Image: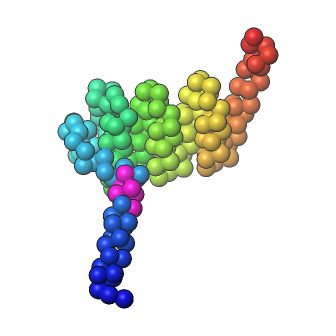
Amino acid sequence: MALSEISSFLGIFGSLAGIGSLYYAWKTDKLARFIPHNPQIDEAFSGNPNAPGLAARVRDMLGKIVDTRRELRVALSVAKTMHFAKPMDEALFEINRRAIELNELAFAFRVAQSAHFAVSLDSMLQNVVDAALARNDIKLAHKCANRMHFAMPADRARKQIIEWLKTRPSPSQAQ
């Protein structure tokens, strides 16, 4: 094997590794931090995360600034960098609410999956179930119910889905 063949293989392997790294960074929202964004998003998360009022600051910032999925991604990536789990879950809860308000239910589901505590996860997923049923998205509602951690909230969500299915008019009745 010649030296040029070895360098070609290493070049191909390196480029594949680089593409894989970029894909991973994009998929886990790590690239969103490097996209130019409004500095007020960073300011809302700055300061002592354990101080009371973090959720209110984040809620105010999300309501005033965040209007697109791109800005939601930036807010999520900044929230994921927080060190303490409880304040991060509070911030994620507010991002989840704002995503539902903006009708980004798939993104709201993704935010919920970033939660550290199961109680926060179940609460955010219940919000997505309610919004999904209001928008007739039974598939997402079922997906959320299956992802819930504790049995009681999961059962409550499944009963809610069943009740929604019972009260929904059948296609023959709708005509």
- The total of numbered circles placed on residues is 0
- For the point 40% across and 37% down, the residue is 95
Looking at this view, is 54 or 42 the one in front?
Answer: 42
Q: Residue furthest top?
A: 175
State which quadrant residue 36 falls in.
top left
Asked if the stretch drawn in magenta spans residue 21, the answer is: yes
Above/below status of 148 relative to 173: below
State which quadrant residue 143 falls in.
top right
Residue 170 visible in the current orientation: yes
Quadrant in the picture for the C terminus: top right
Give the magenta range.
20-26
Above/below status of 143 relative to 23: above
Asked if the stretch drawn in magenta spans residue 33, the answer is: no
Residue 120 visible in the current orientation: no
Question: Where does residue 48 sit, x and y in percent of width and height?
Answer: 25, 48
Looking at this view, is 74 or 26 the one in front?
Answer: 26
- For the point 42% across and 46% down, the residue is 89
- For the point 36% across and 60% down, the residue is 19
- For the point 33% across and 66% down, the residue is 15
Q: Residue furthest bottom?
A: 1
Above/below status of 23 relative to 174: below
